[in-house]
Image (cartoon, coloured by chain):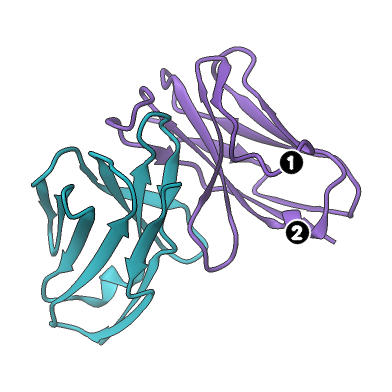
Chain colours: A purple, B cyan
């Protein structure tokens, strides 16, 4: 079946611009996670959703970052006034439920480059 | 605050050899995950370890979890070139389901 998909695969933008990154989880998965991965590092937790609500957004670095999941399926990560330090690969993962007993399936990521 | 440390961070080894990657974490957790990442690719789940003493094996890889020592190991037996990748362990933060990853171990297996 279809896995987690993310669009776009690559995004190049200029400093100060607004970007949206989209994640389509596996159908039926209630938990959805966003991570950021910088070169040579492990994924860094940003936010996770259980259904439509953000269960934990403590990893969002500042208020320029925001994520939504209005219908409990697709999620969008929104970054305002992008900075060069936001350049990274943004990974989305979904699992059947939260709580960690279910495997997280990762999408291919969106590589964001802020010039 | 939960911290997850892996060592070594880089490992170059010959085909046919055995080696172990270690993952230590700083606060109580009863679960641990291992992932593989190939260059330019996303993460692939290898093992989900759900209890103290859990041991799982898949091919030449075997993972174990000791929750009392806050330690997991990923053992590679008779390494082959196809196992070259970066391996991450990840631990859920107790009580909030946030998952913290280690920095990864980049494994390079020489033919």
Q: Chain of mark 2?
A: A
For image coordinates 83% across by 48% down, the residue present is A82
SS class, disc 1:
loop
Q: Nearer the viewer, residue B10 or B96?
A: B96
Q: Which mark is residue A62?
A: 1
Q: Is residue A56 visible?
A: yes
SS class, disc 2:
helix
Identify the residue position indicated by label 2 in the image.
A85
Q: Nearer the viewer, residue A98 or A21?
A: A98
Q: Which mark is residue B72?
A: none
* Nearer-N-terminus badge (2/1): 1
Q: CA distance from mark 2 to mark 1?
A: 12 Å
For image coordinates 34% across by 46% down, the residue present is B91
Task: Respond whether the residues carrying marks 2 and 1 are from the same subunit.
Answer: yes
Spot occupied by residue A98 in the image (x, y as percentages of width and height): 38, 25
Spot occupied by residue A113 in the image (x, y as percentages of width and height): 75, 58
Q: Chain of mark 1?
A: A
Tell whether A25 sits left or right of A29: right
Q: Dot 1 surroundings within 10 Å: few (below 14), some, or many (20 or more)?
A: few
């Amino acid at each position: 079946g279809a896995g987690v998909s993310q669009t776009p695969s690559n995004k190049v933008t200029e400093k100060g611009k607004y970007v949206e990154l989209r994640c389509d989880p596996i159908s039926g998965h209630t938990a959805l996670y966003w991570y950021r991965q910088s070169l040579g590092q492990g994924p860094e937790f940003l936010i996770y959703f259980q259904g439509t609500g953000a269960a934990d957004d403590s990893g969002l670095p500042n208020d320029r970052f925001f994520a939504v999941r209005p219908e409990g399926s697709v999620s969008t990560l929104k970054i305002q006034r992008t900075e060069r330090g936001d350049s990274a690969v943004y990974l989305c993962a979904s699992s059947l439920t939260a709580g960690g007993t279910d495997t997280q399936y990762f999408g291919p990521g969106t590589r964001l480059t802020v010039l | 605050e939960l911290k997850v440390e892996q060592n070594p961070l880089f490992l170059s080894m010959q085909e046919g050899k055995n080696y172990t990657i270690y993952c230590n974490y700083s606060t109580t957790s009863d679960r641990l995950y291992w992932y593989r990442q190939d260059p330019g690719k996303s993460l692939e789940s290898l093992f989900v370890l759900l209890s103290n003493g859990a041991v799982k094996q898949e091919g030449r890889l075997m993972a174990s979890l000791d929750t009392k020592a806050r330690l997991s190991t990923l053992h590679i037996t008779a390494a082959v070139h196809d196992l070259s990748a970066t391996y991450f362990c990840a631990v859920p933060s107790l009580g909030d389901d946030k998952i913290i990853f280690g920095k990864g171990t980049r494994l390079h297996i020489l033919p």
